[in-house]
Amino acid sequence: MWLPTHGPAAEFAARYLALHRAFYARTLSGADLGAWRRRQLATVLEQVSTRSPFYARHLKQADLSAVTPDDLTALPFTTKAHLREEMLNVLSRPLAEALFFYETTGTTGRATPCPRDGREIVASNAHVTESWASIFRHHFGTHAPRIGLMGPTEVHSFGDTLGDIARNTGSMNAKIWPYSPVIGFRKALQLMKDLELEVICCTPGVALTLAKAAEHYGYDLRRDFAVRLLFVTGEMCTPALARNLETVWGADVYNILYGSQEAFVVATACRNKRMHLSQTNYVVEVVDPETGESHGPRGTGELTLTMLMDGVKPLVRYRTGDVVAVTESDCDCEMPGDLVRIVGRTLDRIDLGGRRFTAGQIETAVMTGVTGSAGYQVVIERDGTGQDRLTVRLELLTGLTPDPGALADEVRARTADTLGVPVTVELSDGLDPIVSTGAFVSWKAARVVDRRTATDHETSVAQRMAANRGYTN
């Protein structure tokens, strides 16, 4: 594992990793974990309130001495709008102290800076390393699998972070982003075959597009490749979509981690395909997305994070915009930490037939029981009586669905029953390329065509991006 070698970051890393090892060995007492969280919270609050121009103003009226990890409600929220407005003024250490500079994608608003220093890298990557090592032991024993990393690298943490994790686990990794002009889908597939890559890490959308590209170039996913695990991240992947991916690839699918450029890695997967919070790194709150009322560390609502790493850009009560369900762990795996299930973005909730549905509910309704699909899209419109209607467009790969007509009937009946609106299913031989843009814009922009409303900003961005996302290069 990479470690800082001198200065305050090295001192932090030594203290942190001692705590981290005890946390995973189950020898860390509740009292010691509580003491760490109180000490680090106090350190972060003192740092941001005195050294961040934004937080010096934002927290000016708050009584910081009264704040504890058990009650942060005296502090105001930090929102994505704040980060876009304040930019580098959110930083509480000099930019020169960072080791990496990243940005958000900027597709849904102004790209915001996300620099990271040694403290943040060590603390975030340690949890991912434990996750991958545990899953690799479960599937490969002592063998270190060969990994293909398919994600962006320019001012994006994907390649640096996951390349470091692969090195920590002793695995060879190849960075083969298929949307790169240097690689492309043809070259990515050739390298997957020649290098006999056993683990592919990418978004669900890339995994589906890669399967379509393999069919286009004459590959057989099971005969020509050695892939045993798909590690998907970067966008929502419900169990129903994961199961479909397994039928497409003949590989086990793990929704491997949850995080963001701004907040680092918040939760990691275990061998049981459940997600565990990195609880040494954050104070977690679940808040009502409408009222902002805090439900404490567990429950269902919008995930809100306060960072415990006193790095370059710690965030305080940061509203992620993601709806989650957090519960105490009952998992028999090696990973400690509460369980978290990602429901979808607060902005992705959709009104249908007078009821409101999350992205996860809609995807589950459409994809449950679907096999061999290369993707889906839903179209919402109103009929002549003003009633909402849904059309599901479903793309199927050749030879993987025994009876496409029967599958379409099942999808229609189940989706109509779940969502309470009339549904039509269309089997398509090629969806709009916009469905591949989910990780860069949003699930809603990629998967939903809502003809009841005017095209919004996110959808316009996704449409422009989709123009250059073919796989025949």
Image (cartoon, helix red, strand yellow):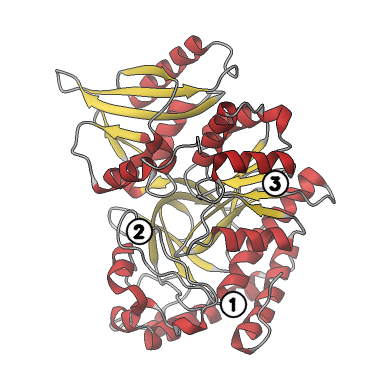
Residue corresponding to mark 1: 118
- Which callout, 2 or 1, points at the residue further toward the start of the chain? 2
Mark identifier at residue 91: none
* Rendered location of residue 29, percent (x, y): 68, 70
Mark 3: few, some, or many residues within 10 Å (few <14, many ≥20)?
A: many
Q: Residue furthest right?
A: 142
Query: Where is residue 283 shown, x and y percent of the image?
Result: 49, 67
Residue 89 figure quarter: bottom left
Give the number of the mark in front: 1 or 3.
Answer: 1
| Residue on which disc 3 sits | 271
Horizontally, residue 127 falls left or right of residue 108, namely right
Q: Nearer the viewer, mark 2 or mark 1?
A: 2
Seen in the picture, residue 309 relative to 455 is either above or below; the reply is below
Residue 307 in picture, x, y percent from top left: 49, 71
- Which disc is residue 106 wearing? 2
Q: Residue at x 59, y 12 (%)?
A: 402
- When the figure is inspected, residue 94 is found, relative to residue 86, above or below; the finding is below
Q: Say which label, 1 or 3, has the lower sequence index.
A: 1
Give the CA separation, mark 2 to mark 1: 25 Å
